[in-house]
Image (spheres, rainbow, N blue to C red):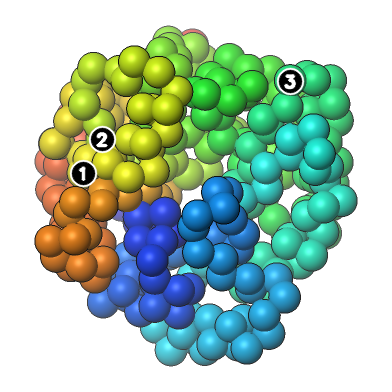
Amino acid sequence: MRNLYSLAHLTALGLSPPQLIDAASDAGYEYVGLRLNRTTPEEPLYDLVNDRMLMRETKTSLARSGIKVWDIEAARMDPSRDHLHYQAFLEAGAELGARHVLTQLPDPEKSRAVDRFGALCDMAQPLNLNISLEFVSWTETPGLVEAARIVREVNRPNASILLDVLHFDRSCSDLTFLRALPPGWFKWIQVCDAPADHPPGPAEAIYTARCERLIPGEGGIDIKSILACLPEGIVYSLEIPNDPSVRKVGFRGYVRRALNETKLHLEANRLSNRHFDQPARR
């Protein structure tokens, strides 16, 4: 089964949504992920929630290119923002035809985080949106164990886990535990590479994640072993921001190179490396 590829917005965050869609189409991606809000004050804001002209331009680019929106990001529910904060955000995603909502829970109050995640799933259900919980190693939902506990506890049909191989590696999450989880919890995965040595602290980890990820095959993460634990045919979202490479070849050249080199690395002998049909699953 052939995997399809999505271009995550963070890989080329300097491109507006219409520009990102055109770059993805030219490079050969099937999908894009669009960032509809800021996660840091420094990054650009592409306010598709409120900017109707930008929404029209983005939908025109989608129709012209044939590219589809795989996900929107990010619904980050911290102590100051609950699920209701994201109603218009979800509606904008549905208008774009998105399938998934990247969600994070940087909230130290675990029962509140669970309640808000379940409520967001309920809000998204009528819009046909899947809520994908991403664990991030430097937040209060740092690893696969914590994400699995939340998804199991909320028990919603549109709840899933988004695994980013960088955060899986940096959180020291376990392949055996991953193989034991329900395959239906995994619809897509964010793919990149990074040096084998872990950063010494959160500041360095955040910098690597946002500015200096590597294309698969250039670093030390055992990406193929992680992918082999997941269902066949899930979408690979390439989230590989690398500022030095972009300065050399530009965004369009870089996203093309990222796709071509990722395919060469991941698709070589991939069938021989799979061990998806494991009896440990339940």
Amino acid type of the residue that numbered disc 3 sits on in the rendered structure: Pro
**Element class at badge 1:** loop
What residue is pinned by disc 3? 108
What residue is pinned by disc 2? 193
**Which one is in front, 67 or 54?**
54
In the rendered view, does 273 fall on the left or right side of 5?
left
In terms of image quadrants, where is residue 13? Answer: bottom left
Q: Are marks 2 and 3 in contact (CB under 8 Å)?
A: no
Amino acid type of the residue that numbered disc 1 sits on in the rendered structure: Ile
Q: Are marks 2 and 1 in contact (CB under 8 Å)?
A: yes
Taking the spot 68% from the left edge, 85% from the top edge, the residue there is 52
Cα distance between the residues tagged 3 and 1? 33 Å
The picture places residue 24, in percent across and down from the top left corner, at: 33, 70
Amino acid type of the residue that numbered disc 2 sits on in the rendered structure: Asp
The picture places residue 219, in percent across and down from the top left corner, at: 17, 30
- State which tag comes first along the sequence, 3 or 1: 3
Whether residue 134 is situated above or below residue 257 in the rendered picture? above
Cα distance between the residues tagged 2 and 3? 29 Å
What residue is pinned by disc 1? 215
Q: Nearer the viewer, mark 3 or mark 1?
A: 3
- State which tag comes first along the sequence, 2 or 3: 3
Taking the spot 45% from the left edge, 74% from the top edge, the residue there is 16
In the rendered view, does 217 fall on the left or right side of 115?
left
**Element class at badge 3:** loop
